[in-house]
């Protein structure tokens, strides 16, 4: 082992004994002084519940293709995965909070693929005032949706375009306001899918409930005629793969929706002040 010799004067009793020189043996690290000994990082092993969550997620997606997403009963899942029913309950609860499962007591467990649900809940906590949530939604749509339309024009397949046409037809055929709202939401959701960007799709899905509330505030008074006209112009640009035109058409559409919402708020505040 490497050593270092140091000369040092002794004090007290050692000085009295006449010892003035001695050797001190100090073990040195094999690493230079400016470096630390390496520490091996050990990745934390997933807990049993986390392992079951991963297994259930894979099973759910296979079940979706096979039988509408329904999973086996809780007891059968516990036997199949060789864990207790308590672990199954904890894992399904976690996946339900993440928007991946729907637990219907007395009915069963179904895969739903709604990963945006945690974001929707967080928005309500961060912005407890409903009017402020809708105002900020309008700003977000103006920022995000024109780019979604541009990407859809560049990337949409024939299947995407057929789905968009079908959503447009459902909007035109809607009789009740609730039907029109769902068809309108579906049109915008399909645009996000056609854009081919899962992050943008998830962001817009997370705004879905707010979008429903926004349309409930405006569609009842404005009707669907303008929405149909705007959608048709956007679809035409997508059919011709004109990205900039699709962007501009969507920008005009969401700005008009934002203006409708602003007028709705003004009318609502005036009614409340008179009351």
Image: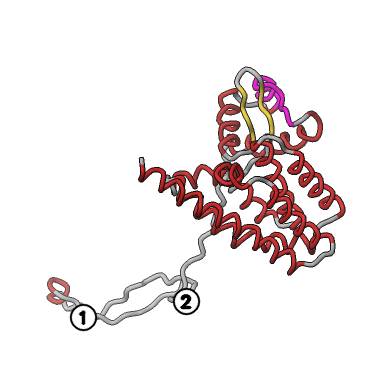
- Residue 164 image position (x, y, % from top left): 79, 49
Identify the magenta region.
69-80
User: Which residue does the numbered mark 1 point to in the structure image?
Assistant: 9
Pinpoint residue 53: horizontal percent, then vertical percent. 63, 37
- Crowding at dot 1, Cα within 10 Å, few <14 / some 14-19 / many 20+, comes out as few
In the rendered image, the vertical position of residue 26 relative to residue 7, given as above or below: above
Residue beneath the point at 81% across and 44% down: 166
Q: Which residue is found at the position 65% from the left and 41% from the top?
A: 181
Question: What residue lies at 43% left-to-right and 72% top-to-bottom?
Answer: 28
Seen from this angle, which residue lies furthest front? 274
Quarter of the image where one finds residue 10: bottom left
Give coordinates of residue 261: x percent, y percent. Answer: 53, 52
Residue in view at x 76 percent, y 67 percent? 243
Front-lying residue, 214 or 119: 214
Q: Residue furthest right?
A: 158
Query: Outermost residue, top direction?
Result: 106
Check if residue 63 falls in the magenta segment. no
For the C terminus, give its image quadrant.
top left
User: Label 2 belongs to which residue?
Assistant: 32
- Which residue is at the front of the view, 270 or 34? 270
Viewed as shown, does residue 44 lie left or right of 66? Answer: left
Which of label 1 and label 2 is nearer to you? 2
**CA separation in Å, label 1 and label 2:** 28 Å
Dot placed on the residue nearer the N-terminal end, 1 or 2? 1
Which of the numbered marks, if any, corresponds to residue 150?
Answer: none
Near mark 2 (Cα within 10 A), the count class, few <14, some 14-19 or many ≥20, is: few
């Amino acid at each position: 082992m490497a050593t270092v010799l140091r000369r040092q004067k002794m004090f007290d009793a050692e000085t009295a004994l006449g010892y003035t020189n001695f050797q001190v043996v100090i073990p040195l690290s094999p690493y230079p002084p400016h470096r630390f000994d390496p520490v091996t990082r050990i990745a934390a092993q997933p807990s049993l519940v986390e392992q079951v969550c991963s297994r259930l997620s894979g099973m759910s997606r296979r079940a979706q293709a096979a039988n509408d997403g329904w999973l086996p009963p809780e007891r059968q899942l516990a036997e199949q995965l060789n864990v207790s029913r308590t672990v199954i309950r904890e894992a399904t609860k976690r996946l339900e909070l993440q928007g991946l499962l729907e637990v219907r007591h007395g009915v069963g467990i179904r895969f739903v693929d709604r990963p945006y649900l945690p974001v929707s809940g967080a928005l309500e906590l961060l912005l407890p005032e409903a009017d402020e949530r809708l105002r900020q939604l309008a700003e977000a749509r103006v920022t995000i949706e024109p780019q979604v339309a541009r990407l859809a024009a560049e990337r949409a397949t024939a299947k995407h375009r057929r789905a968009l046409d079908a959503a447009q037809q459902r909007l035109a055929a809607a009789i009740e306001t609730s039907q029109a709202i769902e068809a309108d939401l579906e049109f915008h959701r399909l645009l996000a899918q056609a854009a081919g960007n899962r992050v943008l799709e998830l962001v817009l899905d997370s705004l879905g409930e707010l979008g429903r509330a926004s349309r409930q505030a405006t569609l009842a008074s404005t009707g669907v005629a303008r929405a149909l006209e705007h959608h048709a112009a956007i679809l035409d640009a997508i059919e011709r793969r004109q990205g900039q035109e699709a962007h501009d058409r969507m920008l005009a559409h969401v700005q008009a929706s934002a203006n409708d919402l602003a007028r709705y708020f003004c009318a609502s505040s005036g009614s409340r002040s008179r009351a």
